[in-house]
């Protein structure tokens, strides 16, 4: 078995748990166990990022966070996989990846180990590890990417919320075009952007403009959108016009 990439990510220190003699492996709930036999197929060849929890049947912190890991696996289904590896049942993987304590979490994406953290973590930290490797929808722009495009005059943000919400706060240079009107005003949408720039749609949380962008793309009229919407923009501390 060949493990690609090695531990090339940004390891972080934390409290691990060593200890007692192993017992029979416990059931993983909704999180499957991966062994040396299926590691390559299930992890290295996965089309979505994989969060691995290295665990052991004697590890009490692993048992304590099991509900958290299982809940996270349900939340990211379709965007990422979550698996467990028992270091006593798959010692070759543990040795090659230099696992020294459990729980240890690693992220594998594009056939390589991208990041890792040692110790028990919560769902928020799991998401921070995996989210950078989520598959991205066509036309999706992250806040920092959109800010750079706005600064260069390449795009015009289009606020799809109602006029009152737009009046309270909007992206710099944004124009207002309510989302329920856009599909009947496509020519105006592109006129608003002008000849040298393209429109980028955004809403409060990103979901509505993502769905609209997908519909327009299916119709042969692709339009970019802000991933995470205004909330993601504000979370990055980017400027707002009021």
Image (spheres, rainbow, N blue to C red):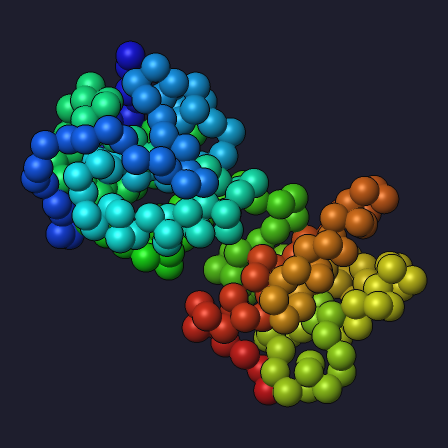
Residue placed most toward the observer, 109 or 99: 99
Q: Quadrant of residue 123?
A: bottom left
Q: Is residue 90 visible?
A: yes
Residue shown at 19% from the left, 31% from the top:
23
Residue placed most toward the observer, 236 or 25: 25
Residue placed most toward the observer, 43 or 32: 32
Quadrant for the N terminus, please: top left
Q: Taking 14 as reference, is 189 left or right?
A: right
Q: Position of residue 81 (x, y in %)?
A: 46, 37
Q: Taking 136 as reference, is 195 left or right?
A: right
Spot the residue most to the right.
Answer: 184
Q: Position of residue 48 (x, y in %)?
A: 49, 34
Q: Is residue 72 above or below residue 22?
A: below
Residue shown at 53% from the left, 43% from the top:
77
Q: Taking 75 as reference, is 159 left or right?
A: right
Residue shown at 81% from the left, 50% from the top:
216
Q: Taking 206 as reference, is 121 left or right?
A: left
Spot the residue most to the top.
Answer: 1
Residue shown at 28% from the left, 25% from the top:
5
Q: Quadrant of residue 25?
A: top left
Q: Position of residue 90 (x, y in %)?
A: 24, 22
């Amino acid at each position: 078995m060949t493990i690609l990439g090695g531990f090339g990510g940004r390891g972080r220190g934390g409290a691990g748990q060593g200890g007692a003699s192993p017992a029979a492996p416990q059931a993983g709930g909704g999180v499957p166990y991966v062994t040396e036999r299926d590691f390559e197929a299930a992890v290295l060849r996965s089309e979505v990022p994989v969060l691995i929890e290295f665990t052991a049947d004697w590890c009490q912190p692993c048992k304590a966070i099991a509900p958290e890991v299982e809940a996270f696996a349900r939340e990211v289904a379709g965007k990422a996989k979550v698996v467990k590896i028992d270091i006593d049942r798959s010692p070759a993987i543990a040795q090659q990846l230099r696992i020294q304590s459990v729980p240890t979490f690693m992220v594998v994406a594009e056939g390589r180990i991208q990041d890792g953290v040692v110790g028990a973590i919560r769902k928020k930290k799991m998401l921070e590890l995996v989210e950078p490797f989520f598959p991205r929808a066509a036309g999706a722009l992250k806040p920092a990417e959109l800010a750079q495009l706005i600064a260069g005059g390449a795009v015009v943000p289009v606020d799809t919320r109602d006029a009152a919400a737009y009046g309270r706060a909007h992206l710099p240079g944004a124009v207002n075009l309510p989302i329920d009107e856009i599909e009947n005003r496509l020519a105006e949408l592109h006129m608003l952007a002008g000849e040298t720039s393209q429109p980028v749609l955004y809403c409060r949380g990103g979901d509505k403009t993502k769905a609209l962008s997908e519909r327009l793309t299916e119709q042969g009229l692709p339009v970019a959108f802000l991933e995470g919407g205004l909330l993601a923009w504000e979370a990055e501390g980017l400027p707002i016009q009021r």
